[in-house]
Amino acid sequence: MSPGGASPPRRRRWRGGSPWIVLQLVLAGSLILLFALPIYALFTYAPPAEIWDAFNDPAVRAAIWLTMLASGIAVLASVLFAIPLGYLLARHSFRGRSVVEAFVAIPVVVPHLLVGLGLFLLLIPGSPLYRFTTAIGVPVYDTIWGVVLVMVFVSAPYTVLASDLSFRAVDERTVEAARSLGAGPANAFLTVSFPIALRGIVAGLLLTWARAVSEIGGILILAYYVLPAGPYTGPPTSTVSILVYDLFQLGDLQYAAAVSSLFLLIAFALFLAVRVGERSGWLPWRRGDLEP
Amino acid sequence: MTRWAVEGVSSHVERFALGPVDLALEPGRAVAVLGSSGAGKTTLLRTLAGFQRAIAGRILKDGADVTDRPPEKRQLGYVPQGLGLFPHRTVERNVSYPLEIRGRTDARARARELLERFGLTPLAARYPARLSGGEAERVALARALAAEPELILWDEPWQALDVEARFELGRVFAEIRDDERVPVVVVTHDPELAFSVADSFLVLKGGRTVFQGRPTELLARPIDPFSARFVGYENVYDPAALATGGPGSLAAWLAARAGPGGVVFARPVLPALGPSTGRWEGVVRSAHPTPEGVSVVASVDRLSVALRIPPPLPEVLPPVGSRVRFDVEDMNVHPLGAIDVPVAGIGR
């Protein structure tokens, strides 16, 4: 971008658009910087050797495993419960719809410490729900189930909203075409609506996962320490977010940065894998719109 | 070969009421459903397809009542407006869809045959987003035929197609009608398509049938301004337009021959050479050459009248502003009836 070296017509065009383009670049660039700089700080504060140590530390590994496992279960729960709710909102108009929509928005707008407190009070020892969860063998206090519960609460709305929007965007005429060509309602859903909406739903599930792994507020109250129970059989540990919080509290800034960097790398690799999978067509849901 | 009969079918969408409509659908015959926007054309098609409930009347397929059957049990080839191609499936897998749904093991092979027949083989691996309008139409048609339909329902097939694609699609359409021996119902705004493929016309207005019969009948006796313009008349005047003329004017002369819906007449002919003669005089507003001669528009008092000079094309077109004289043959003037249809609302 050296105006002196540009040919006359190009220079004219550049002059015409320049204040507008510069404004856009400055505004967008500021936000990108805000996103990037803390990451830069983390990685520069923790030397690679320290990150490698964290990678080999059984305590860190347990925390990462717990976080991955719990967030994975939370995403599965979203697949099972949030997608149908999104479909319901997209395809049916019913009384009390806006009330349902308001409830879906609650987890997004309420501070998460309150969420933890609410769940804590709901499941307080002696309460019917406490007796029920204990009886069926999914105790929530200080177990992975508590972590999952909080994660689902705070993250499932992203899948509900993404599914709602994605199913809304499916052209009803494609569904009618499928029906007229011999597919019953369920078949048309499975072969047409769902695969078309899947592109958007997957984006929602990724957000759900991201929100789940970053949760701390509710987990602080419900499952600060996680003891082995259910699918988690490792040593007592905490989620990565709480582990980093603990290290920070103890004053071990360098190790806190190392654990954070390590987890960032893992999360980033996962996102990248999904994107590359989509681009290469190995993951099927975006094939139609990515064809060159 | 399946025969379909529609007997007094009525339906409604919100406040718009359709029907009663009667139709006989014979194998190898095509019915064009015509009408201005909101006349109920698409509603009729959706009722035949089973997406819209018939509140009265019956739909019979070879004598069996299918009025309440869901769309998937009607053996249809339905091509909705906008085609409804599956964006997540390739061309080939769009076409094989109806066969896959039926669990047919020869789905792929049969789809390939259809692709070959419609000249789509080179596009087999493409996704619909990358097809041209004409290609997409052919894919939709091939997919509808893959369902081995006993009735083809086609909504606005020519919308947004260029001239070449229209020509090609018209050819394919006629071929299907003749080869498949399946009744076809086509909703269209396009007179060219309607005249080239349909054996009969059904004209809807405000949800009611206002004409049903052979295209030539509609041409000989247009029933209302819409159908007059649809079949190609340009000199169509409603009573209000005719009220503007004083005694002895063309408007007054036409008013004396008009029906309650106005009047229509074919283009009067001007001589290619020499001065024109006739009872009426007009001022040329425009003149342009066509394969059928020169199309001239002249104003006569406040009326705009379309005239024509038959071929061969003259060397010089009548200049704008010049005066021409012409006659209107009594036998070419058709009164338009007032078809008193209560318009129930805005339909689809």
Image (tube, coloured by chain):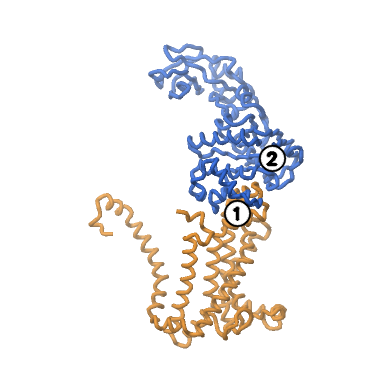
Chain colours: A orange, B blue
Q: Are marks 2 and 1 on the same chain?
A: no
Tell me if residue B206 can be seen. Answer: no
Note whether A183 is above or below A123 in the view shown.
above
Which element type, helix, strand or loop, lies under badge 2? strand
Q: Which residue is mark 1?
A: A192
Spatial CA span between label 2 and label 1: 31 Å
The chain containing the residue under callout 2 comes to B
Q: Residues within 10 Å of mark 2 (few under 14, many from 20)?
A: many
Q: Quadrant of residue B255?
A: top right
Amino acid at dot 2: Ala
Note whether A7 is above or below B150 in the view shown.
below
Amino acid at dot 1: Val
Residue at image position (57%, 65%) is A159
Q: Residues within 10 Å of mark 1 (few under 14, many from 20)?
A: many
Comparing B269 with A226, the one in front is: A226
Which quarter shows the N terminus of chain A?
bottom left
Q: Quadrant of residue B64?
A: top right
Q: Nearer the viewer, mark 2 or mark 1?
A: 1
Residue at image position (34%, 60%) is A22
Comparing A200 with B91, the one in front is: B91
Q: Quadrant of residue B244?
A: top right
Comparing B160 with B250, the one in front is: B160
Q: Which residue is mark 2?
A: B17
